[in-house]
Amino acid sequence: MKSILIQAAWFCILLASFVTGLHAAFFDVMKFGAKGDGKADDSKAFTGAWGAACKAPGANTITAAGKFMAGPIWFQGPCKGPITIDAQKMNLLALPDPFAFKGHGGWVTFSQVIGVTINGGIFDGNGATTWNLPDCGKNGHICPLPANLQFNAVTGLRLIGLTNRNSKQFHLRIGSSKDVTIERYTVDAPGNSPNTDGVHIGQTSKVSIIGATIKTGDDCVSLGDGVQDVHVEKVTCGPGHGLAIGSLGKYPNEKPVLGVTVKNCTLTNTLNGARIKTWPGSPVGSATNMHFEDIIMNNVSNPILIDQQYCPWNQCKAGLASKVKLSGIGFKNIKGTSSSKMAMKIDCSPAVPCQGVVMNDINLIYKGKDGSAVSKCTNVKPSIIGKVVPAACSVHK
Ligand SMILES: *[C@@H]1O[C@H](CO)[C@@H](O)[C@H](O)[C@H]1NC(C)=O
Ligand SMILES: *[C@@H]1O[C@H](CO)[C@@H](O)[C@H](O)[C@H]1NC(C)=O
């Protein structure tokens, strides 16, 4: 009886995929009124193609080949089936004026969709004119500036071979999503472009980022609260601020971080290497099971850094302890050069000292007139495996 039910279920799945296959259709943005001259605002053609592809049953593909310019594009689900955007020959440029994006927070946004694939594509945020605007929110300036690409509540996201350039703010923001794969990803923005994280992911589970080259002015990859089961591999960072878990503990009701592996990455001339940061005076929170392995540091200012007093622009209550508990942290096979003497700093909270920190085979070299590299540990007693240079926390307490 049971096996008949299983067979029936399989038959239904096969039938569904067959029907889905039959309905696969293509939706070319040119047929939805795109000019494709790289000057006219083609956003309506993109949302028009999306609307049609989304309403039609089956696994549909939107195609865009050529040069396009666009203001905010909002791709809203739910859709009848998964959607692929074939952007292999697409070069999309954002309108330069940040006010065109007022109230959007993103330039190209996908919301509440099951199954999105973007194949290729160049997304150029045209951000240069916005990078030197006065601080967000002050003097009536647009706030927040738009992220190049933003995914909210998407299940089954695949970004393959995408190039993301010169965003006005984050290049890629993913939130409240599940099952995310990013492969052969490129980010290119100058080292002095503020707040232009290569990827920021929060409240999302089952993520793999495999193969990326990220040059930008802020974090290379940053993982916020509520990320679970995240794998970051073969990522090259620099310039920029390096790989970060956090910042955590800025807001109430943040979700725990659970399971992050960062492997086989190279950082060159970045401000930080492998970093975990939490705000002082934070609400209670936790981050567990975070591993950095096989990482090469080339002239990185803070190659290994746990900072539980993260407080940029003095936005926090100084002197209060962070209540975000960090545990199960590994740094393994991390080699290369530090551009500052303090190559390794593990500054944990006095309220909730770090637990289960393991340093395994580390060799960080500093060549300065003021001597060789040092480390500093506060509120943590790391376990040492193999050879660790600079000697971890043997002197400082
Ligand atoms: C990953 O490891 C391989 C083999 O050691 C190496 O050739 C490659 O450069 C590494 N990639 C990165 C991004 O570090
Ligand atoms: C190393 O990093 C420092 C500080 O970030 C920078 O001033 C210097 O130019 C870098 N050296 C090389 C060789 O890139």
Image (tube, rainbow, N blue to C red):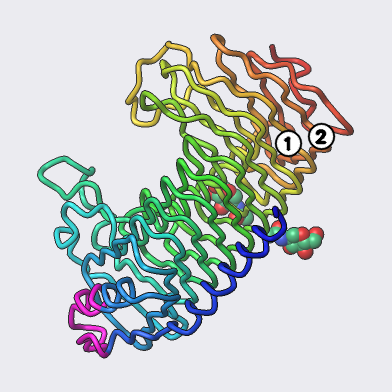
Q: Which structural element holds mark 1? A: strand
Q: Report the magenta residues as a range.
A: 31-48
- Along the line of sight, which residue is nearer the eye, 242 or 19? 19
Q: Residue at x 46, y 57 (%)?
A: 216
Q: What amino acid is at disc 1?
A: Phe
Q: Residue at x 33, y 60 (%)?
A: 78
- Along the line of sight, which residue is nearer the eye, 379 or 32? 32
Residue 123 lies, in percent from the top left, at 38, 71
- On residue 360, the disc is 2
Residue 229 lies, in percent from the top left, at 61, 43
The residue labelled by disc 1 is 331
**The C terminus sits in image quarter:** top right
| Crowd around label 1: few <14 · some 14–19 · many ≥20 (10 Å) | many
- On residue 94, the disc is none
For the residues labelled 1 and 2, say whether their Cβ atoms are less than 8 Å apart.
yes
**The N terminus sits in image quarter:** bottom right
Q: Residue at x 64, y 40 (%)?
A: 303
Q: Quadrant of residue 68?
A: bottom left
Vertical position of residue 124 compared to residue 297: above or below: below
Residue 307 lies, in percent from the top left, at 54, 27
Vertical position of residue 395 compared to residue 340: above or below: above
Q: Quadrant of residue 149?
A: bottom left
CA distance for labels 1 and 2 = 6 Å
Specify whether residue 313 is painted magenta: no
Sooner in the amino-acid sequence: mark 1 or mark 2: 1
Q: What amino acid is at disc 2?
A: Asn
Image quadrant, ligand 1: bottom right
Residue 213 lies, in percent from the top left, at 57, 63
Q: Which structural element holds mark 2? A: strand
Q: Quadrant of residue 304?
A: top right
